[in-house]
Image (spheres, grey):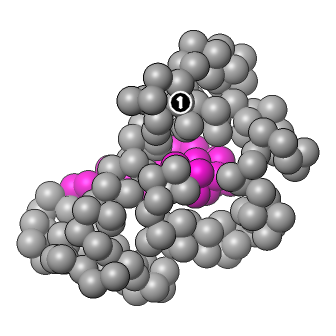
């Protein structure tokens, strides 16, 4: 895939603000949970860039290959906790909002495992990754994870 444009070059101030917000939201949650949410939403959205990047990040942070590979079938896989399942169900419900998912059932599971503050943080994280998916897919972005980290570090420093 060939990139249509570089959003960091085209709108550096806005992309820096978006990146800073993204990092703040991700930093407010358990990194394992963040990686699962990022990968699952990216799978649903068909964002190869984000699947690649977040799977690499998850591996670096100690996530197992098994849990990464089974993420698209998390309901049937025994390797996720009830808390992770609640977050994944909420991720799917919000990512597939236009498909009329069973939002209430997903919310009840979320509420059973997360405080109100955590519910907001997870919801923000889901919005962040869905936003990144739309930026990457929309502009045809695909970057090596190391190159993406370098671009992000450069944008934050600017």
* Quarter containing the C terminus: bottom left
* Quarter containing the N terminus: bottom left
Q: Residue at x 54, y 66 (%)?
A: 51
Where is residue 69, by image quadrant? bottom right
Classify 83 as above or below 104. Answer: below
Q: Residue at x 50, y 56 (%)?
A: 42
Magenta stretch bounds: 17-41
The picture places residue 37, in percent across and down from the top left corner, at: 58, 48
Q: Is residue 97 visible?
A: yes
Q: Residue at x 18, y 70 (%)?
A: 7
Classify 83 as above or below 133. Answer: above
Q: Is residue 82 magenta?
A: no
- Most extreme residue toward the right is 78
Query: Is residue 60 left or right of 127 when viewed as pictured?
Result: right
Examine the residues drawn in magenta and state their main secondary structure.
helix
**Viewer-proximal residue, 19 or 48?**
48
Q: Is residue 19 magenta?
A: yes
Query: Is residue 37 left or right of 20 when viewed as pictured?
Result: right
Q: Residue at x 54, y 19 (%)?
A: 103
The picture places residue 157, in percent across and down from the top left corner, at: 26, 74
Where is residue 20, by image quadrant? bottom left
**Viewer-proximal residue, 155 or 69?**
69
Classify 33 as above or below 109. Answer: below
- Most extreme residue toward the left is 10
The picture places residue 63, in percent across and down from the top left corner, at: 75, 65
**Viewer-proximal residue, 53 or 142?**
142
Q: How many marks?
A: 1
For label 1, count other residues whose C-alpha is less than 10 Å away and answer few (under 14), some (14-19) or many (20+): many
Secondary structure of the residue carrying numbered label 1? helix
Q: Is residue 157 visible?
A: no
Q: Mark 1 — residue?
A: 93
């Amino acid at each position: 895939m060939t990139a249509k444009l570089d959003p960091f070059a085209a709108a550096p101030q806005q992309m820096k603000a978006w990146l800073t917000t993204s990092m703040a939201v991700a930093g407010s949650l358990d990194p394992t949970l963040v990686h699962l949410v990022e990968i699952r939403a990216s799978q649903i959205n068909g964002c190869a860039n984000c699947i690649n990047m977040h799977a690499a990040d998850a591996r670096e942070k100690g996530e197992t290959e098994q849990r990464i590979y089974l993420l698209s079938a998390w309901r049937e896989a025994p390797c996720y906790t009830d808390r992770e399942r609640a977050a994944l169900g909420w991720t799917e419900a919000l990512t597939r909002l236009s498909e009329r998912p069973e939002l209430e059932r997903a919310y009840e599971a979320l509420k059973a495992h997360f405080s109100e503050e955590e519910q907001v943080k997870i919801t923000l994280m889901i919005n962040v990754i869905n936003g990144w998916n739309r930026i990457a897919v929309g502009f045809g972005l695909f970057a090596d994870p190391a190159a993406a980290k370098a671009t992000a570090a450069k944008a934050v420093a600017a």
